[in-house]
Image (cartoon, grey):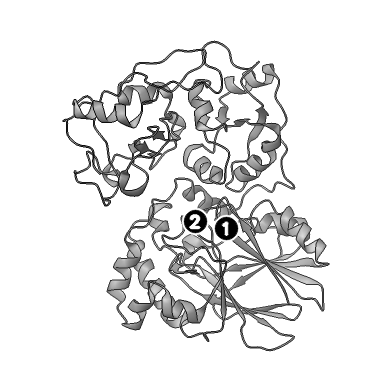
């Protein structure tokens, strides 16, 4: 049996290709949407993709299963478990097989058994794999978002992302039962290959290793002691505590992955826009996504643009901040455009109408800038009662004062400023408008987080009104940094900074 793990760093997502050397057939499990990686890998290995399987209806990325099936003619193997809300739709024109618990299929000599493992989602299935050319005993367990290295899939996403209330606790109870009856009953030697690694929002404590074993998790996973004591209540409480906030785009991914998404037929290649094209698209409602680093953006940017620096977290931030109903223009170096486009289509942001390589020749009038203050200046303002530290996150070590406004209690769609870093202590960053986050350079960082909306509605002037900062005006070049700008005047009581 040929086995390959394909890792996408931006979403910490893992997909798999399994091939039968005897027949030349291959199975791909949980493919991402830029499917050329699987086509090229199969070709290099002398395989043809005949089967594509999914563990569940994903929330954090747009599935490439239909895209790959259209490109190869392969059969889709999908879950038929769960209630009517989570049944696959939009499968007309595809060859597909719906799987129940215990169903099996073969890809050459590879035997694959579907195991219903609800908890993360009601329809979730995992795949128990045996190399039939050697033995019928299971060798691999492809667990999707059921079991990770050192963690299990969060059961609250239907509630957090899809808005289906009252599902988190029942999901946690189903996870306990799945672990007890479907995971711990397997032999210790079975290898566990999950759908995500460290950095994914689908769990809270995912390990960085690419794989584990049933025996290792049985002995060392945080949840193992609860299963050993048969402590379901303790497990439920521990599993639901401290889960990260679900990005707003997860709801859109759930819908598209269930009902179907546009078939791209290849990787889009946005072209460089002329000044006339650029102006026309902006006039029609396009959003300029400025992918320069935060210091360049602070030095000078076009009003209304959104700063999401190019990097491994680009997909996640784009999902947080960009709407799905407006065209996008990238401000990026030409060498970055393809990778940024791939990062966007992985979460269904397909309408990239073009790019510009810089502001020169495109921007008219004065650029907006972002004033910055040092941690020392922020401290002085706070001591004088001219600024207040706004902590809307969960309680952390080193925070001695009650937050002004708790994040999970804020009104729907309203921004919240959340300290970032160990214990809310200072870290070097800068205050950025347009929703990508606010940070104080060398001081406190406040990423903006949203629930029930996107940050496309938050403009620099809105953030200035929030903070009561006078509007700056400068013809700043792309690298200019403004320090010692207007103070942040929130009001508040003087005191000593936490830590």
Q: Position of residue 214 (x, y in %)?
A: 50, 79
**Residue contact between numbered discs 2 and 1, judged by CB atoms under 8 Å:** yes
Query: Where does the C terminus fall, quadrant-wise?
Result: top left
Residue 385 at least partly seen? yes
Query: Does 404 appear above or below 398?
Result: above
Residue 29 at least partly seen? no
How many residues crowd around disc 1 within 10 Å: few (fewer than 14), some, or many (20 or more)? Answer: many
Residue 200 numbered tag: 2
- Considering the numbered disc 2 on the image, is that residue within a helix, a strand or a loop? loop
Query: Does 438 appear above or below 130?
Result: above
Name the residue located 53 percent from the left edge and 45 percent from the top edge: 313
Specify which label sits upstream in the sequence, 2 or 1: 1
Query: Where does the N terminus fall, quadrant-wise?
Result: bottom right
Real-space Cα separation, disc 2 to disc 1, in angstroms: 7 Å
Query: Does 282 appear above or below 244?
Result: above
Q: Is residue 50 left or right of residue 388?
A: right
Picture quadrant where residue 229 is located: bottom left
Residue 13 numbered tag: 1
Q: Position of residue 400 (x, y in %)?
A: 19, 46
Q: Position of residue 204 (x, y in %)?
A: 41, 60
Name the residue located 42 percent from the left edge and 57 percent from the top edge: 157
Name the residue located 46 percent from the left edge and 71 percent from the top edge: 118
């Amino acid at each position: 049996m040929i086995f390959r793990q394909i890792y996408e760093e931006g979403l910490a997502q893992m997909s798999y290709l399994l091939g039968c050397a005897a027949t030349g057939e291959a199975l791909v499990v949980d493919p991402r949407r830029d499917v050329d990686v699987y086509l090229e890998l199969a070709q290099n290995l002398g395989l043809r993709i005949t089967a594509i399987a999914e563990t569940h209806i994903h929330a954090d990325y747009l599935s490439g299963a239909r895209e790959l099936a259209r490109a190869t003619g392969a059969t889709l193997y999908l879950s038929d478990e769960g209630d009517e809300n989570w049944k696959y739709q939009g499968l007309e024109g595809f060859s597909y097989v719906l799987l129940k618990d215990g169903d099996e299929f073969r890809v050459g000599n590879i035997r694959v058994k579907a195991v219903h493992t609800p908890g993360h989602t009601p329809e979730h299935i995992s795949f128990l794999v045996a190399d039939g050319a050697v033995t019928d005993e299971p060798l691999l367990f492809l667990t999707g978002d059921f079991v990770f290295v050192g963690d299990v899939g969060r059961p609250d996403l239907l509630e957090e992302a899809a808005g289906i209330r009252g599902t988190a606790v029942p999901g946690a109870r189903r996870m306990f039962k799945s672990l007890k009856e479907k995971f711990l009953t397997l032999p210790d030697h079975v290898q566990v290959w999950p759908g995500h690694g460290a950095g994914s929002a689908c769990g809270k404590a995912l390990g960085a290793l690419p794989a584990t074993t049933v025996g290792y998790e049985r002995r060392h996973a945080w949840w193992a002691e609860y299963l050993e004591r048969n402590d379901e209540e303790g497990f439920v409480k521990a599993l639901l505590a401290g889960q990260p906030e679900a990005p707003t785009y997860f709801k859109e991914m759930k819908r598209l992955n269930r009902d179907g998404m546009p078939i791209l037929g290849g990787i889009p290649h946005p072209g460089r826009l002329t000044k006339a094209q650029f102006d026309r698209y902006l006039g029609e409602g396009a959003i300029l996504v400025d992918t320069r680093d935060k210091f360049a953006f602070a030095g000078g940017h076009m009003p209304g643009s959104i700063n999401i620096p190019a990097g491994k977290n680009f997909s996640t931030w784009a999902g947080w901040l960009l709407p799905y109903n407006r065209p996008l223009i990238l401000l990026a170096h030409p060498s970055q455009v393809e990778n940024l486009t791939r990062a966007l289509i992985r979460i269904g942001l397909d309408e990239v109408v073009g790019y510009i390589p810089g502001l020169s020749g495109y921007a008219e009038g004065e650029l907006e800038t972002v004033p910055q203050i040092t941690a020392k200046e922020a401290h002085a303002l706070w001591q004088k009662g001219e600024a207040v530290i706004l902590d809307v996150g969960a309680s952390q070590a080193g925070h001695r004062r009650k937050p002004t406004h708790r994040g999970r209690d804020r009104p729907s769609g309203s921004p919240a400023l959340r300290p970032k870093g160990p214990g809310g202590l200072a870290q070097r960053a800068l205050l950025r408008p347009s929703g990508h986050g606010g940070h104080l350079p060398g001081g406190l960082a406040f990423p903006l987080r949203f629930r029930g909306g996107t940050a496309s509605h938050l403009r620099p002037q809105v953030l200035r009104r929030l903070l009561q900062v006078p509007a700056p005006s400068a013809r700043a070049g792309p690298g200019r940094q403004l320090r010692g700008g207007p103070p942040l005047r929130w009001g508040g009581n003087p005191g000593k900074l936490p830590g």
